[in-house]
Image (cartoon, rainbow, N blue to C red):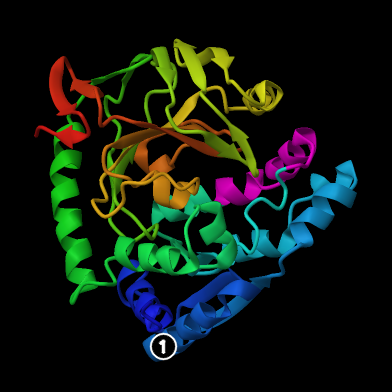
Amino acid sequence: MNLDLPSKEAKLIVDYSVSVQKGETVVIWGSTESIPLVKELYREVIKAGGHPITKLDVPGLPYIMYSEGKSFQLRHPNPLLLYLVKNVDVAIRIRAPSNPEEISNIDTKKTSKYSRSFAEFYQTFFQRQATGALKWIVAPYPTEGAAQHAKMSYEEYWNLVEKSLFLDKIDPIGEWKELSRKQQIYCDFLDNADKIRIKNKGTDLEFSVKGRKWLNFDGKKDLPDGEIFTGPIEDSANGYITFSFPGVYQGQTLEKIYLKFKNGQVIEAKTSTNQNLLDEILRIPGSDRIGEFGIGTNPTMDKYIKNILFDEKIAGTIHLALGLGYPDTGSKNKGEIHWDILTDMRDEGEIYSDGKLIYQKGVFLI
């Protein structure tokens, strides 16, 4: 277990991911579990000439809000977060949960109300990052809780974080630049595409991406990273898709999700667990349409760990996000949530672009 991980990760984030410049205001938002990384990030921001501010979450507070909060409190937007997302130049969000299952037994109606209180936050965030006014990164810090959630030892999880961020390499930034180069080839090709068709077990889904921009996520938005994605034309999806991996929403797990689309809208939705939750999600404005279609490319990961920050990057998987789309892809979906669900393409999955097979069994053919 490499104890230099916090300092190496901090350097990667500040120097490469968000490239902090002199005079920029930088919020470092983590939890008390991530203090070693927060301190190193603070140090690196100071070195870069930025103005660091910190926000630390306390484990256990979400449970108190969900279990004891009244409806008007659950729906209340957090004014501090709104101020930060509207005013800082750089946002560094550290994911370091002490107990990822903390709210798994909370009534789904409460979790839905609370998630919708972030609507203005996410809309502002997506708009500012699309124009370049806000640089941001979401990154992990290993915790015992996250390791247990992934069914790993703490040391195994620590090593997973190091490997998936290329921090075990001599030149991590060089590794990210090389992945970026490869991904840009796919993006350039798909920028000229119109019809995308996905075929897989229990899946035959088609939609249009004509005129939409494909984004290359190469370690400058998420860590770990490694995906390309776009926002499909909102009324173009037709067909059906079965997700091989569980969907996780506000700590709740939904197994074997099946969605059927007509003219962009979900017209049928099933899950083997938590059907009421799936129905509740789809009633949230905008969440019955696709905001994002993404393809994972990170070669260092091959195991699903029920953590979307990692899972959606697995090479050989694809994901759809229901709800809010990235404006910089051209997406016009204004949903109140952004919920990613993924499926494995490595056995028999195929992707066609305007009738041409471009991806088979988890591998690009272009």
Q: Is residue 334 left or right of residue 252?
A: left
Is residue 355 covered in magenta?
Answer: no
Residue 324 visible in the snapshot: no
- Quadrant where the C terminus sits is top left
Residue 59 visible in the snapshot: yes
The main secondary structure of the magenta stretch is: helix
Q: Residue 102 placed where, x, y %?
A: 71, 53
Q: Is residue 59 left or right of residue 305?
A: right
Q: Residue 348 placed where, x, y %?
A: 24, 22
Q: Residue 128 placed where, x, y %?
A: 48, 54
Q: Residues within 10 Å of mark 1 (few under 14, many from 20)?
A: some
Secondary-structure class at tag 1:
loop
In the foreground, 62 or 184: 62
Q: Residue 25 placed where, x, y %?
A: 51, 77
Is residue 112 covered in magenta?
Answer: yes
Q: Please name the residue shown 50% across and 75% down the image.
A: 26
Vertical order, 366 against 154 (above or below):
above
Vertical order, 131 against 262 (above or below):
below
Q: Please name the residue shown 22% across and 34% down the image.
A: 362
In the foreground, 74 or 257: 257
Which three-letter amino acid code belongs to the residue tagged 1?
Gly
Q: Which residues are magenta?
A: 105-124
- Quadrant where the N terminus sits is bottom left
Residue occupying the far left of the picture: 366
Q: Is residue 28 left or right of residue 107?
A: left
Q: Is residue 256 left or right of residue 294?
A: right
Res 199 → quadrant: top left
- Residue for badge 1: 49
